Image (spheres, coloured by chain):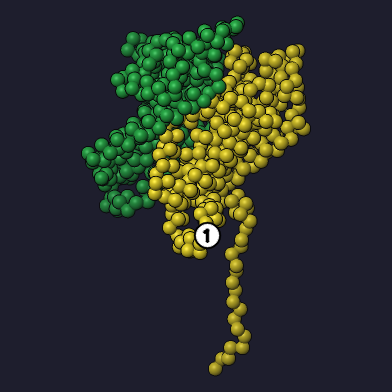
Amino acid sequence: MAVVTTTPEITYKAPKRRHPVVQFARTQPLGAAGLVFIVILFIAGLFAHWVAPYDPLDLDYGAMLAPPSWDHWMGTDAFGRDVFSRIIYGARTALAVGFLASLLGSGFGAVIGVVSAYFGGRVDMLIQRFMDILLSFPLIVLALTVVAVLGRFPVGGLDLNLIVAIAIPMTPKVARVVRSSALAIRELPYVDAARAAGYGHTRIIFRHIAPNVVAPFLIMFTAFIAQAILLEASLSFLGLGVTEPTAAWGLMLSGTSQEFYSQAPWMIIFPGVAISFAVFAFNLFGDSLRDYLDPRLKV
Amino acid sequence: MLRYTINRILLMIPTLLGVAVLVFLLLRAMPGDIVELRFMMEGGQVSPETLAIERARLGLDKSLWWQFYDWMTGIFVGDFGTSMWTGRPVIDEIASRLQLSLQVAIMATILAVVIALPLGTISALYKDTWIDHLIRVFAIAGLAVPSFWLGMLIILGLLYSFNWIPPLTFVPIYVDPWHNLSQLIWPAMAVGYRYSAVATRMTRSTILEVLQEDYIRTARAKGVFERLVVSRHAMRNAMLPVVTVVGLEFAFLIGGLVVTEQVFNLNGLGKLFVETVTRADYTMVQALVMLVAAFFIFVNFVVDLLYAVLDPRIRYR
């Protein structure tokens, strides 16, 4: 009779828990590539005065409409300003406007969505009807009207009213998506428990429901940064967004560029590439973030 | 079905009324009305009496309630008023531009559908192969490239390669189709790229979803040719979300042309909108916004009805 003398060693390998960022990079290589580009853009924008070879406002009448060369990598515009430097500084404008507008729009939208779902009934109906009204305006039409109504309100080189104008058309879209997620959360037992415990509405909304709609919120937030950058570029191009002499990508495509771009195509090619790449990166990242956090969400 | 249809039509009224109130109030909140803007442009000193007379002529001296009431009652008898800037009836001003914008929008839609359906389907069928990656990058890039910049590149390309730029004057398609198309095909391409990108992504994701269904496996099991499985079973069932996206994007295209029309110097609705907003031409902006909003709400409604036609399982009550 064999006697078992030793207990067999139980081998159990705990699943390796990677840092969420590492996990994201491994499963979503394209999204990670987008993130890397966003970070580069951020650094370039933040440290623009070190990265850019020239001052973006420096006029050089000796080198007007100069083609790309070693001195001016992307050429110069009709005032002799260095296009490359203006693009670097433009990153600052685009990111600042994109982030703030998207934060404002999706933040506000998320609050409206959660409140609408939580209270339900007549409140929900009223809010949703109002959102329907806002949704029946095309993005740019609403933004244009708001810009015209609010006028300009520059703070530190940034037009706060422009940010509001870009944020408003986003709000109903975010509200709609967040509301549908929050509707499901509202029915969960712990919300009932919280209510039974006598917590107030504010506490239940912000402590119990809001944390559970963070995933759709984050996804919408990144998706709308891209939209905000595009919208800012369009508005600036129309002369209703960022104004001269601030460097902004959309603005670089308008004004004198319109007259000279057949002779100096670098004036419009590079800013457009910058817009496209920035939006592309945010879209790539946003898409992957959705696949990573909540693949079923339709944005 | 009939009850549902009637209900939906009735529900449009409050939404449209809301749009009307919103745009009306927004415009009145704008700093400086059309009278001030106009005399400012002409320069020189204008006495307050002249401004008052001009305001009275345009009906801006009445209370907000009366202005809104006048506008609404006008709409009910089909009178949208006259442009405060040009003095011409709003309907006439819009009609001449609508023709152009609508044509560009329709051409862009055709372009988008023709590109998106095959690309989206191929992308789904060859998921995770190089061809799928290629199409996905094409689609994501389409969402990133600003259509007005693409328009500039198109003009630049035409100029450099053919030393030719599209004609600047609009001629209706029934008068001179060649001239008309050679002008409008380019803006349609510029906005169509983004549009097709949206539709391609939708087609791909819905076909992927449909391919998981039991009836696809059944069809394959009973030996239906793969080509028929894709065209009859998968594509037909994937059409619903694609129709939605195409419809909604189409509704917004009219407004979305705002920037692209500027690039091609097209005298369309978008350009009219920018002009009238900066001039504070209340009657004109109101009519334009109402038109776009009504169109959007109507397309939404048609899309919902199409659902029932395309998918007999859907029954509205």
Give the image location of residue B77, x and y in percent: 30, 20
Q: B260 above or below A12?
A: above
Give the image location of residue B162, x and y in percent: 51, 13
Toward which corner of the image does residue A157 lie, by quadrant? top right
Q: Colour of chain B?
A: green
Q: Amino acid at mark 1?
A: Tyr
Q: A188 above or below A272?
A: below
Residue B184 vs residue A19: left or right?
Answer: left
**Mark 1 element type:** loop
Q: B55 above or below A199?
A: above
Q: A187 above or below A246?
A: below
Chain letter of mark 1 equals: A
Chain letter for the part of the structure drawn in yellow: A
Give the image location of residue A87, x and y in percent: 67, 27
Q: Residue at x 52, y 35 (%)?
A: A168
Toward which corner of the image does residue B285 lie, by quadrant? top left
Q: Residue at x 59, y 30 (%)?
A: A161
Give the image location of residue B224, x and y in percent: 28, 47
Residue placed under numbered mark 1 in the picture: A199
Q: Nearer the viewer, residue B110 or B90?
A: B90
Q: Residue at x 58, y 91 (%)?
A: A3
Could you tell me which quadrant the C terminus of chain B lies in? top left
Residue A18 visible in the picture: yes
Residue A42 vs residue A200: left or right?
Answer: right
Could you tell me which quadrant the N terminus of chain B lies in? top left
Q: Nearer the viewer, residue A184 or B229?
A: A184
Q: Residue at x 76, y 12 (%)?
A: A62
Residue B125 visible in the picture: no
